[in-house]
Image: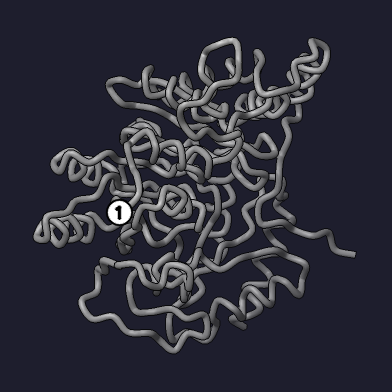
């Protein structure tokens, strides 16, 4: 039987770093929400990325939620959010009963279009409103036009939150994603480039970073007041990372650079072996950036002989996992009533069975496939995937 090839599975260090840190936690009986692994993991992530402060949390989603609270987002506030992303980016906006406004992508980065973002500011300023925060995503490890987006947010004096859940290790002009905005989000979910089996990290880059991080610590531990008895003046959350998971994360962080190199190798392997096929385009990258290539994503020509579902089904038949590109938030039924600022002037639904429209993000979804990019893959695995793809063109 052929071995299953995963889209992206956990990859523990060959040196066993994770077990060493976990054993120390067990040996000292620090297995809860506090302990050396947690505090050291925060310091190590901050040192690796260059963030002023880092707070270890239970998930990347929790980190987005805490970033929104730290930015002062409350009920009825507007939040401009990239449309082409996973729902975890947008859901915390609703947790705070705020109102998402979704922003289209550009083809150069697949991420938030700076022109559409400026258009959104202009639209709402005309009616006397502006967002309380902006959330940009570095999709699949691809760096957004982060310099332009950060400048736009500074001009309008609006906090910028970078969803860098998928882009740990990606840099722009040598600076890590997640550190250009006021807040950055990292995910350590099981499918990410490194994992703690679950968990996330909030990066805080504001001038009062230490104060903001202290607030997040407090909110994330049920907002308990610093008195002997249990007293609460705010709503809190059970969002802290455990000492065990932080130990796994510390071990994984030691091999981050190796994992980035392997994912970049996988991207280049696909590009070398498949780019001659008509109708295939590979995910882009800004010249000044270095992507972690967390997932290798491709676009298939709209009227080409092979369409995304054809490719996904062919790979599935060979026990190979792949996925469509994220379905944009403005096309999700739960967000159907939300405003969408498109790069395209006249929107209409296309003939795609997946319910796409002709926006840039809609077309990236309609014609995109995420290829298996597991850092556990061998060259034989990559050959097997490429052979399945090539047969569809024969």
Quarter of the N terminus within the rendering: bottom right
Vertical placement of residue 301 versus 103, above or below: below
Q: Nearer the viewer, residue 365 or 93?
A: 93
**Quarter holding residue 389:** bottom right
Q: Position of residue 9 (x, y in %)?
A: 70, 48
Residue 280 visible in the snapshot: no
Quarter of the C terminus within the rendering: bottom right
Mark 1 surroundings: few (<14), some (14-19) or many (≥20) residues within 10 A = many
Identity of the residue furthest to the bottom in this view: 351
Asked if residue 208 lies left or right of residue 42, the reply is left
Task: State the residue at coordinates (30%, 20%).
Answer: 208
Vertical placement of residue 211 versus 152, above or below: above
Give the colour scheme of this rendering: one colour
Asked if residue 35 lies left or right of residue 256, the reply is right
Identity of the residue furthest to the left in this view: 126
Label 1 belongs to which residue? Answer: 80
Q: Nearer the viewer, residue 263 or 386?
A: 263
Q: Position of residue 305 (x, y in %)?
A: 52, 86
Q: Nearer the viewer, residue 237 or 210?
A: 237
Q: Say which element carries label 1.
A: strand
Q: Position of residue 118 (x, y in %)?
A: 17, 55
Q: Nearer the viewer, residue 240 or 153?
A: 240
Task: State the residue at coordinates (54%, 11%).
Answer: 227
Number of labels in the image equals: 1
Task: State the residue at coordinates (80%, 14%).
Answer: 29
Asked if residue 221 lies left or right of residue 164, the reply is right
Q: Position of residue 236 (x, y in %)?
A: 52, 33
Task: State the residue at coordinates (70%, 39%).
Answer: 197
Residue 226 visible in the snapshot: yes
Identity of the residue furthest to the right in this view: 1
């Amino acid at each position: 039987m052929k071995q299953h090839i995963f889209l992206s599975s956990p990859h523990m260090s060959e040196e066993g770093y994770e077990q060493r840190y976990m054993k120390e936690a067990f040996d000292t009986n620090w297995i809860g929400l506090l302990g050396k692994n947690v505090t050291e993991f925060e310091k190590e992530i901050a040192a690796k990325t260059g963030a002023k402060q880092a707070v270890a949390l239970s998930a990347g989603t929790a980190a987005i939620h805490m970033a929104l609270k730290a930015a002062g987002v409350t009920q009825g506030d507007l939040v401009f959010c990239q449309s082409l992303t996973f729902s975890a980016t947008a859901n915390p906006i609703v947790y705070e009963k705020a109102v998402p406004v979704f922003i289209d992508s550009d083809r150069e980065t697949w991420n938030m279009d700076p022109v559409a973002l400026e258009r959104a500011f202009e639209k709402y300023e005309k009616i006397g409103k502006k967002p309380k925060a902006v959330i940009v995503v570095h999709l699949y490890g691809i760096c957004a036009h982060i310099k332009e987006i950060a400048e736009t947010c500074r001009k309008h004096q609006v906090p910028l939150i970078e969803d860098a859940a998928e882009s740990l290790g990606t840099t722009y002009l040598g600076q890590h994603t997640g550190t250009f905005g006021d807040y950055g989000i990292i995910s350590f979910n099981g499918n990410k480039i490194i994992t703690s089996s679950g968990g996330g990290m909030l990066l805080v880059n504001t001038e009062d970073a230490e104060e903001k991080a202290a607030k997040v610590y407090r909110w994330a531990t049920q907002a308990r007041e610093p008195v002997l008895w249990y007293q609460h003046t705010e709503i809190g959350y059970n969002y802290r990372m455990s000492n065990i998971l932080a130990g796994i994360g510390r071990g994984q962080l030691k091999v981050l650079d190796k994992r980035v190199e392997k994912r970049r190798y996988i991207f280049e392997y696909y590009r070398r072996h498949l780019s001659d096929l008509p109708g295939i385009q590979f995910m882009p990258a800004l010249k000044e950036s270095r992507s972690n290539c967390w997932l290798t994503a491709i676009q298939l020509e709209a009227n080409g002989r092979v369409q995304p579902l054809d490719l996904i089904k062919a790979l599935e038949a060979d026990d190979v996992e792949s996925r469509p590109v994220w379905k944009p938030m403005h096309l999700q039924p739960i967000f159907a009533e939300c405003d969408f600022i498109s790069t395209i002037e006249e929107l209409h639904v296309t003939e795609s069975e997946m319910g796409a429209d002709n926006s840039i993000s809609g077309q990236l979804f309609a014609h995109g496939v995420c290829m298996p990019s597991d850092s556990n893959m061998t060259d034989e695995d990559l050959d097997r995937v490429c052979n399945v793809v090539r047969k569809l063109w024969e």
